Image (cartoon, helix red, strand yellow):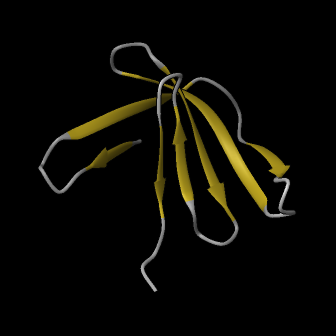
């Protein structure tokens, strides 16, 4: 899986686990998978049923949402 940003930069992530399910504190269902990026850094990709996508790394979190 990889993401291409507006700048044209791309980040590639490699799956290292199976897709798992969970429920947030706000009772939102989500699925997540453990990955590593090209440098070997662990990144968890989390997709909520409401369409929010998050990438969690040790030193940052990126969140994508649709504009309203």
Specify the quadrant of the image occupied by residue 50. bottom right
On the image, the x and y values in percent for residue 9 come to: 16, 42
On the image, the x and y values in percent for residue 41 come to: 45, 17
Residue drawn where x is 46% and y is 86% of the image: 68
Q: Is residue 45 left or right of residue 20?
A: left
Q: Quadrant of the N terminus?
A: top left
Residue drawn where x is 51% and y is 42% of the image: 55
Q: Is residue 29 left or right of residue 60?
A: right
Work out whether residue 45 or residue 67 is closer to the camera in this orientation and state it: 67
Q: Is residue 16 left or right of residue 59?
A: right
In this picture, is 43 found above or below 28?
Answer: above
Give the total number of marks visible in the rendering. Answer: 0
Residue located farthest toward the bottom when viewing the structure as drawn = 68
On the image, the x and y values in percent for residue 34 come to: 62, 29
On the image, the x and y values in percent for residue 65 come to: 48, 68
In this picture, is 62 found above or below 64?
Answer: above
Residue drawn where x is 64% and y is 37% of the image: 33
Work out whether residue 14 or residue 29 is closer to the camera in this orientation and state it: 29
In this picture, is 48 found above or below 11?
Answer: below
Residue drawn where x is 80% and y is 64% of the image: 28
């Amino acid at each position: 899986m990889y993401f291409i940003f507006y700048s044209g930069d791309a980040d590639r992530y490699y799956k290292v686990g199976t897709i798992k399910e969970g429920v947030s504190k706000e009772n939102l269902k989500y699925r997540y998978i453990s990955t590593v990026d090209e440098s070997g850094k662990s990144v968890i990709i989390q997709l909520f049923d409401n369409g929010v996508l998050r990438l969690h790394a040790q030193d940052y979190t990126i969140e994508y949402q649709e504009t309203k």
